[in-house]
Image: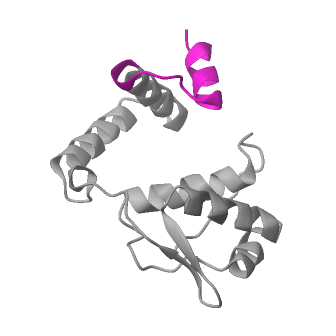
């Protein structure tokens, strides 16, 4: 089950936060094909958002082929985004956890680490660093 957390100060549309958190859960293997997403009513009760926002997020996930609504039953996961190389017991994850622990011991805070990781990801994969991460990076220059 996914527990959605809505950050109203993030500048990211609420429905996109739900989409991103669902994809994150799919990438980490927390959601598997066949799992049922929380109902719109459950998400509304937990987050105090408009039910249409939840439905908009679920439609976007459906459009991307990740979930499927089943009338009268709910919305179900169709496919996973998890990769073995990123699994909880993968060497890459262990190396990243070790690196994060070293960064913490070196005195970096969460925002420092996020900015550093975003910069390296941008260099390696290209593309623009999103909103607040870019601001954090530019603030450190």
Q: 111 or 19, which is in the foreground?
A: 19
Residue reaching furthest top? 141
Q: 45 or 36, which is in the foreground?
A: 36
Asked whether residue 5 appears in the rendered view, the answer is: no
What residue is at 72 percent from the left and 74 percent from the top? 46
Give the magenta part as a residue range.
123-141
Image side of residue 44 versus residue 116, left or right: right
Q: How far across and how far down the image is residue 111, in percent?
A: 54, 33
Q: Is residue 134 magenta?
A: yes
Q: Main secondary structure of the magenta part?
A: helix
Image side of residue 122 versus residue 15, left or right: left
Image side of residue 110 versus residue 125, left or right: right
Q: How far across and how far down the image is residue 112, in percent?
A: 50, 28
Quarter of the image holding residue 135?
A: top right
What residue is at 74 percent from the left and 80 percent from the top? 41
Quarter of the image holding residue 28?
A: bottom left
Image label count: 0
Residue reaching furthest bottom? 72
Asked whether residue 102 appears in the rendered view, the answer is: yes
What residue is at 43 percent from the left and 23 percent from the top? 122
Q: How far across and how far down the image is residue 116, in percent?
A: 44, 25
């Amino acid at each position: 089950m996914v527990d959605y957390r809505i950050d109203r100060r993030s500048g990211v549309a609420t429905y996109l936060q739900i989409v991103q958190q669902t994809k994150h859960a799919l990438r980490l293997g927390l959601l598997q094909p066949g799992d049922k997403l929380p109902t719109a009513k459950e998400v509304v009760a937990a987050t105090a958002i408009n039910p249409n926002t939840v439905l908009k997020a679920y439609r976007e996930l459906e459009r991307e082929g990740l979930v499927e609504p089943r009338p009268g039953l709910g919305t179900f996961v169709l496919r996973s985004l998890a990769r073995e190389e990123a699994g909880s017991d993968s060497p890459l994850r262990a190396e990243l956890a070790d690196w994060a622990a070293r960064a913490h011991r070196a005195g970096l805070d969460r925002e420092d680490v996020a900015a550093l990781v975003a910069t390296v990801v941008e260099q390696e994969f290209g593309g623009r660093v999103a909103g607040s991460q870019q601001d954090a990076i530019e603030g450190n220059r």
